[in-house]
Image: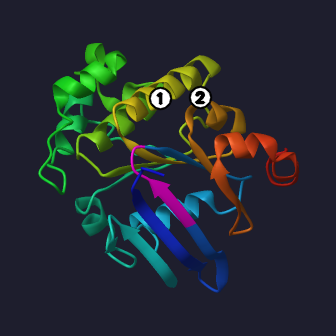
Amino acid sequence: MAEEKLLGVKELAVFYGASQILFGVDLAVEEGRTLALLGRNGAGKSTTLKALAGVVKPSSGSVALRGQEIAGWASDRIARGGMGYVPEDRQVFKNHSVEDNLKLAVKKGVRGQEDWNLDRVYEAFPLLLPLSQRKAGLLSGGEQQMLTIARTLMGNPEILLLDEPSEGLAPIIVQAIAGLIKDLKKSGVTILLAEQNMRFCLKVADDAAVIDKGRIVFQGSIAELREREDVTKRYLAI
C-alpha cells in the first residue's frame, strides 16, 4: 500500500495494580486513514488510548510514532511529540469561554506546521463560532464534544485519538460528529477512534481492529470486517 505507517504498536501490556488489562496489543495506523478500535464495554479500548497518550504507563511493549519510540514517555511529552488525545469525558475548562478553550491549546506541530488555527477551526466546526464567547460549561454534550476535538486540533497533532466520541449523544449529534470525522479524514487528518458503536464506525472508518479482553482479535479494512460475521457476532454483538 502507498500509505506510510504513522503509528505502530507492538506487544503493548498494561496493568492497573495487580490486574492486567492489555495483553500484547498490536496495532498499525496508516497516515491519512481512520482506524476504528472496536469492542464491548471493558474490552480495553479506553485503556489502549490512555496508554498511547501516556495517561497510563505501559508495563511493556512498543509505541512508535513516525518511527520514534514513545512508550513510557510522560503524557505532556507525548502531546508535544504529535499525539492529540480527546478523552471520553471531554474535560473542557468549564469557566472559560469556547474561544479561550481553543486558544489555550495553540501550538505548532512537531514539524513546525500551523495548519490548524482559529479561522480553520471555526470553518471546520461552524457550530462553535456563534458560541465562541459562551462558557464551555454551559454547552450541551455534543457541543462540548466538538469543542474538545477542535481544541485538540489547535495543537496540530500528527494523529488524533478519539475515545468514544458518539457515547451519550443524541442521534442527530452523532450524525454531525460522523460528518465531522469524515471531513477531517478528507483533509488528511489521521485518526484512531475507540468505539463500541459499530454502525457509527462503519460509516466513518477506513480500517478496523477489534479488541476483546485486552487482546486484538481482528485487524483489517472495514470492507473485510463487513465480511467477517464470525467476528462481529462473537465480539461486537450486544
- Image height check: is 158 above or below 201? below
Would you call the spot at circle 2 few (<14 residues within 10 Å), some (14-19), or many (20 or more)?
some
Q: Residue 68 or 143: which is nearer the viewer? A: 68
Find out whether the residues at labels 2 and 1 contact each other: C-beta distance under 8 Å: no
Q: Which mark is residue 192?
A: none
- Report the residue at 60% width, 71% height from top: 25
Q: Is residue 167 visible?
A: yes
Residue with the mark numbered 2: 169
Query: How many numbered marks does the figure carry?
Result: 2
Q: Which mark is residue 182?
A: 1
**Is residue 53 left or right of 172 when viewed as pictured?**
left
Q: How is the image coloured?
A: rainbow
Q: Residue 138 or 65: which is nearer the viewer? A: 65
Q: Amino acid at mark 1?
A: Lys
Q: Residue 202 or 60: which is nearer the viewer? A: 202
The image quadrant where one finds the C terminus is top right
Q: Looking at the picture, how far across and down is residue 95, in whole percent?
A: 28, 36
Range of the magenta residues? 27-32
Instruction: Give the mark nearer the N terminus: 2 vs 1.
Output: 2
Q: Would you say the magenta stretch is mainly helix, strand or loop?
A: strand
Q: Amino acid at mark 2?
A: Leu
**Is residue 123 left or right of 231 when viewed as pictured?**
left
Q: Looking at the picture, how far across and down is residue 4, in whole percent?
A: 39, 56
**Is residue 16 left or right of 86 when viewed as pictured?**
right
- Report the residue at 58% width, 25% height from top: 174
Would you call the spot at circle 1 few (<14 residues within 10 Å), some (14-19), or many (20 or more)?
some
- Report the residue at 15% width, 46% height from top: 113
User: Where on the picture, by quarter, is residue 152?
Assistant: top left
- Report the residue at 48% width, 56% height from top: 29
Dot 1 falls on a residue whose secondary structure is helix
Dot 2 falls on a residue whose secondary structure is loop
Q: Looking at the picture, how far across and down is residue 204, in whole percent?
A: 56, 33
